[in-house]
Amino acid sequence: MDRVKTGISGLDEMLGGGIPARRHVALSGGPGCGKTSFGFEFIYRGAQAGENGVYISLEETEEDIISNMKNTFPMFADVDALIKAKSIKIIKPDKLDMEGIAETIEDEITKHEVRRAVIDSATMIRLSMAKEIEYRQTLFEFLSLLRNLDCTTITTLEATSPQRESVTFDIEHFVMDGIINLYNLDRGDKRIRALEIFKMRGTDHSRELVPFKVLPNGIKVYVGEKVF
């Protein structure tokens, strides 16, 4: 099986070597769980390895994404060079339109040989639609378009709660190829970030809940450690 290494310390080990190529994974979590950081590092590590990536932001501008990620990961010294070389491209579409996003990814694949994409976030598209049934139908059509493209995609989702015990399942949990849940857990007088791979079709994977930290040189997932 072809796999795409995320490059995130510990995560590829939990995934058995990486995300199965051309799959579409949801990265779900509440505010402050680190979804944008995970998505950006996925694109960044790919660019370092010679795989062009596109980050589609439906909320923040390109300038805000770059500024925030430079502050989050100050040791990613080559971000500007990778952006200048078009190994990393950040796009903020004018419209919250899934069909248009799929066309943008397809265009980037054709013109710049993009192999990784992040969409941040599907929740914004959902909120823009008047009816739930419209979102569900659009999501199915969107995934059908993506499955015809030679690209591995991560889509962020806003969870209803940062707590594991309060997470509810929605349409994305059933139709996406994979789900990685991020949590911001209460532990006494502090919060601990943790993740679990909820599902990943077509491959075995770790099912443990493990802590992670966002460090200046990248995210570190502490495989084998318990969340206390």
Image: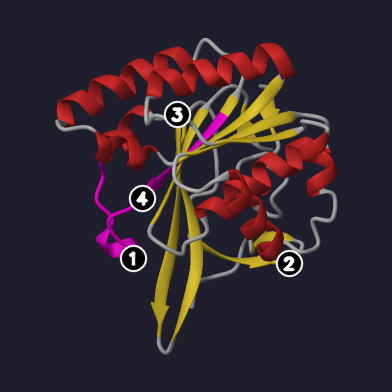
Helix, strand or loop at mark 3: loop
Q: Quadrant of the N terminus?
A: top right
Q: Is residue 36 above or below residue 149?
A: below
- Dot 2, crowdedness within 10 Å: few (<14), some or many (≥20)? some
Q: Is 172 positioned to the left or the right of 107 in the image?
A: left
| First of labels 4, 2 by sequence position | 4
Q: Position of residue 178 (x, y in %)?
A: 46, 35
For label 2, the residue is: 216
Q: Nearer the viewer, mark 1 or mark 2?
A: 2
- Report the Cα–Cα distance between label 1 and label 3: 23 Å
Q: Which residue is mark 4?
A: 158
Q: Foreground: 141 or 26? A: 141
- Which residue is under mark 3? 177
First in sequence: mark 4 vs mark 3: 4
* Amino acid beneath label 3: Asp
- Amino acid beneath label 4: Glu
Q: Which residues are magenta?
A: 153-170
Report, in whole angstroms, how far the alpha carbon at label 4 lies from the one at label 3: 17 Å
